[in-house]
Image: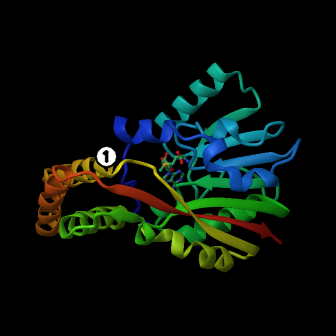
Amino acid sequence: MLEGYAPGYGRDAVSMMSARTAAERATFAQPLFGPGMWVVDLGCGPGSITLGLGAGSRVTGVDRDAGQVAMARDSARRAGRSTVDFVVASAYALPFDDGCVDVAFSHALFEHLAAPVDALAELRRVLKPGGRLALSTSDWSKARLRPKTANVDAALRGHYLLRRRAGGDPFAGRKIADHCAAAGFTEIVSRPRYREDLTYRDLARYVESRLDAAISDPDYGRDRDQLASAARSAWTWVRSGDGDFSQCWVELTATRV
Ligand SMILES: C[S@@+](CC[C@H](N)C(=O)[O-])C[C@H]1O[C@@H](n2cnc3c(N)ncnc32)[C@H](O)[C@@H]1O
């Protein structure tokens, strides 16, 4: 399976993720947590959300990147959270037995996966019967940008292309409920939530930096013309006036039968 990870682990991406908290990102999942439960946070990144999940529960953050796991372990040590641990593992091969996890949580992972139904089947395997799933996944097709000029549209098309070339799906949020059903989950409830993740100008800079990096990669080859044109649009977007951006996140809960 061809799967990269489009945001990468540069300082801008990691500091954006490190600023996220469970109080802000996992409110929809809080009713599922209870004392003595085992909660898994899949694609935990630097662990700032993981640390706030399920007080009184054992929490295990999982990420395929050893650097993210090292950062997360360090944060847990500094926060004195001895009931939180972190492991390096793939979403497709979790190092847990069948039917042992009470709640599986994941924020901002499924939009980066090339085989989301396979990852959901793996979560279903490790969940106990009656165990709960809580996912939050972005849907760029419903993101709100004002003004949404021709340059903004062209730059975003390049951004989506990079996400797809890394194996992800920028519109994953609109399919996640169907993917959960395909993986055998029931009682699937989903709702959109809008968040101002970045300012309009910071989003423009982020998109420009990823497009610039892509077109200066000598191995990039295919799609270079489209990406170069998108990078020029992003350059103009960065230098245009201010605006508004809010991202659409699809928050979903489901049950493992
Ligand atoms: C966008 S970050 C989200 C981090 C955190 N959950 C948050 O919302 O701030 C996605 C994380 O998923 C991890 N990841 C990507 N693909 C993965 C896979 N196949 N298995 C496990 N982790 C993966 C990445 O290394 C990255 O740390």
- Give 243 or 250, whichever is nearer the viewer: 243
Q: Is residue 95 visible?
A: no
Rendered residue at 43%/38% (across/down): 14
**Is 97 drawn above or below residue 130 in the view shown?**
above
Residue type, mark 1 in image = Asp
Rendered residue at 61%/49% (across/down): 25
Q: On the rendered structure, is 217 left or right of 249?
A: left
Residue to which mark 1 is pinned: 202
Q: Quadrant of residue 74?
A: top right
Measured as percent of width and height from the top left, residue 107 is found at 58, 53
- Give 103 or 55, whichever is nearer the viewer: 55
**Quadrant into which the C terminus falls:** bottom right
- Label 1 neighbourhood size at 10 Å, few (<14), some (14-19), many (20+)? few
Measured as percent of width and height from the top left, residue 150 is found at 19, 70
Q: On the rendered structure, is 77 left or right of 160?
A: right
Q: On the rendered structure, is 240 left or right of 98?
A: left
**Quadrant into which the N terminus falls:** bottom left
Query: Could you tell me which secondary element the residue under label 1 belongs to?
Result: helix
Q: On the rendered structure, is 11 left or right of 193?
A: left
- Give 67 or 226, whichever is nearer the viewer: 226
